Amino acid sequence: MKRVMYLMSASLILTASISSCSKDPLKNMTDEESRIYVTNRADSVDFTTYATFSIADSVAVISNTSNDRRELTDYDKKLIADVSAAMVAKGYKLIARTGKPDLAVNLTRIDNTYSSVYYDPGYWSGIGGYYDPFYWGYGGYGYYWPSYYQVYQKERAVSIDLIDLKNPKNNQLVAIWNAMLRGSGVWNINNVDSMVTAVFAQSTYLKTSN
């Protein structure tokens, strides 16, 4: 597993100062500077061996303050459109999920603003299966994440999950790439373009051979 963390601004590099008048960098960051983008990939996967993908038609929302659900707000539509465009720009072809795509893209908004909630991407098999293997046409299959994808946080976040539909293993679908978007304004529709651009730009290996 490889993990890349991208900070929006070099101003996050902290330097010591003995001056009582100097600003605290962590208290004077803009919303953009506060955002952190972490991408994970499966080491053994050759992303050039995949050609097609399908993306979920809505966004799952998990929260400790309300029932978990799927939504299609203007923000969600924008997120779906931008991620789709980014995948196409990487050379992958968008097809319907009934067309047996090589890859599935799941999108999740996570709201842990009010208290600590342990986020384990393996939740797909435990809270109702919003995009479980049945959704992608793999009835009877399981769905798991390697343990290194576990995340613990206390804020709103967005997860983009790439699932291998081409190579199921022992009746299991495996997540091979994940991007976690964290920080202020991640649920602001005006920030979707820059956030999606950032996570795909740092994932240079994510491209097809076409």
Image (spheres, rainbow, N blue to C red):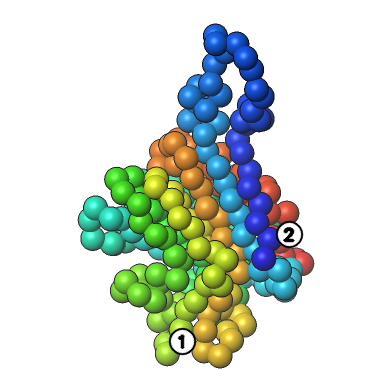
Residue 94 figure quarter: bottom right
Q: How far apart are marks 2 and 1 (CA)?
A: 28 Å
> Where 125 falls versus 55 (above or below)?
below
Going from N to C along the chain, the mark reached first, 2 or 1, is 1
Few, some or many C-alpha atoms within 10 Å of disc 2 (few <14, some 14-19, many ≥20)?
A: some
Q: Can residue 84 be seen in this view?
A: no
Residue lying farthest to the left in this orientation: 66
Residue 15 as seen in the image, left or right of residue 23: right
- Amino acid at the residue labelled 1: Tyr
Q: Indicate the secondary structure of the residue bearing disc 2.
A: loop
At label 2, which amino acid type do we have?
A: Tyr
Note whether residue 149 is visible. Answer: yes
Q: Where is residue 96 in the image (x, y as percent from the top left)?
A: 49, 71
Q: What element carries label 1?
A: loop
User: Which residue corresponds to mark 2?
Assistant: 205
Q: Residue 96 carries which label?
A: none
* In the image, residue 171 above or below residue 106: below
Q: How far across and how far down the image is residue 138, in percent? A: 46, 85
Residue at image location 40% in from the left, 70% down from the top: 123
Query: Which quadrant: the C terminus?
Result: bottom right
